[in-house]
Amino acid sequence: MNSFIYDTLPTKRHFRYLVLQPGDGDDALIGELRTAHIDQALDFDAISYVWGSPLQVSEIECAGNSIRLTASLRDVLRSLRLPDKPKCLWADQICINQGDIAERSRQVALMADIYKKSKTTLVHLGKVTPEEASNVASLLAEVNDLIRVQMGTLSSWDRVANVAPDDPITVDERWMSIGALTQRPWFDRVWVVQEAGLSSRPVILFGDLIFEWETVFRALKWVQLRATVIAYKFHLNWHGIHMDREEIWCGKEPSGTAAPWSFLDVMHASRQLQATEIRDHLFAFLGHPAASHPDTKQLIITPDYARDIAELHLEFATRYIQWTKNLDILSFVQEAGRLSSSWVPSWAAFDGSVLAQLGEAVYNAGGARVKTLPSFPVGGKGLNIEGVLLDDFHFLSPTFLESDFSWGRCGHPGQEGHKWAGILEHVLDPSAPYIHQGHRFASCAITATIGISGLKIDELESAFSRFLVSYRPDIERRLGEAELNRLLGPAAISGLEGESIEAAIAAPLINRRFAISKGGRYGVVPSTANMGDTICVIIGAKTPFVIRRTAVDPGEHTLVGECYVQGIMNGEMLDVQGIPDVGPITLV
């Protein structure tokens, strides 16, 4: 057959859908592409799947011509077609002319509406064995029955009991099949988040079985909240961006004390997902309510696969600041994938946690609002803001890695103990600069947990001491046994472990460095911070930042990244007498 030639769509609001003809097994795929306006009342299902290998190894016949397909979509269509009547579907690989960049760009802007309009979104996870499907079906039914009984009519997770470690369900081998389900490639792809999120009814296809979305994710929520031992034992994966679908896309209030998802939180979560095209880390979330201006409904950026990637990110960041009149986006700048403008985040690369997220309920270093709105130099890529330049560095530790913590499963406790030994050597040195009142060791513990451990000072010191015992050999070599025992107390002798606080230390420290400024402030700073860089409080930003003077113009700086600095996280620097005046800063 000849290759199918696509007709031009009449308007930006038109799209194509596939009428898949009946068939069975390995019968040839035959269908018809029809054109419709998105506002028409149509009865079709949208497919959410993973393209897999880009090699087009199969085909579907349309109007006597051929549209080439990947093996993945071929298998999806074979599993979805009916034996006795046509079925209306939407699949991007067929319904969008992939060879026309302009059409692809226009259709991407329409995809949110397509998934909203679909009767059902069919999440196809790929081929499975009958045993896997049976295990998943029976275990999901049992867990959901248990949840319903315990929740009762109030539907509150507070009524659901924690699972005892010796409960038989914690060793049920059927969890291996649930674990295999959560590790399917679908859960790691960037586009599928919006596809399921905007659907009025997403369902999960697992072999020949169909599960309602909530049936699967209610069971995973139960594991997350009440049975984490199962997750560790059977390698269950979950991503908050899928778990909280209704909160992110439908405006549902989060349960308990959970913070609501901001648009930047959603964008940051996508950094850990996969996309063939870097621009899709921007385009795949344009269906989010916050991606359109609340008054004009204008999209924050217009999808265009022909545009330069750096320009798209610059436009996104610029417009976000203009729309929101805040500087939260600066906290999401990370070294990985850095673009031409230092203050513009790249959403396709992930370094680690965002401090402003971890402490979003308590941090307010630069005050609640910007006093002078940021401006953008005409024809340039800079950002004009106001801030206070504080301090350079006296000490920077080596960068902490995931392998420095036992919970990361990448190494052994004590493997990199010299990092803690070096930190403590500087912290306990009477000649080293120190600005805060109180015990230096306590200040070190507060800083290592970026001030949000929730523990009282004496409790935090004790927990931090137990954590440091894992690194005893290296610390003892630097400080001596007597000093170590005095510092860590009975915990150092008994060998008690500090597992309970390790996660609170690891989350903010991974890919960052412990720092002491020349003025004696303790902090946690980006891995790329250098001696000679400056700590800066930017007016209107939640966290302080590390910035670096450019070699071209001493009045210009590059943004290294956000940081935690003990004692200035709640606007203290804006009220202290004798600090340098607030002045203009240009980031380039």
Image: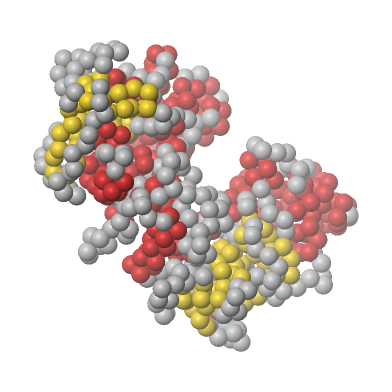
The answer to whether 237 appears left or right of 5 in the picture is right
Q: Which one is in front, 574 or 500?
A: 574
Q: Which one is in front, 353 or 157?
A: 353
Give the colouring mode of the picture: secondary structure
Q: Which residue is drawn at 36% across and 39% down?
A: 192
Residue 19 in sight here:
no
Q: Which one is in front, 169 or 382?
A: 382
The x and y percentages for residue 208 are 32, 18
Q: 462 above or below 403?
A: below
The extreme left residue here reads 41
The extreme front residue here reads 2
The x and y percentages for residue 33 are 18, 31
The answer to whether 480 appears left or right of 286 in the picture is right
The x and y percentages for residue 71 are 38, 24
Q: 112 above or below 586?
A: above
Q: Residue at x 33, y 27 (%)?
A: 69
Q: 458 above or below 74?
A: below
Residue 415 in sight here:
yes
- The count of marks equals 0
Q: In which quarter of the image is residue 29?
A: top left
Q: Residue at x 83, y 46 (%)?
A: 473
Q: Which one is in front, 505 or 148?
A: 505
Q: Residue at x 60, y 68 (%)?
A: 546
The x and y percentages for residue 39 are 13, 45
Which quadrant is the N terminus positioned in?
Answer: top left
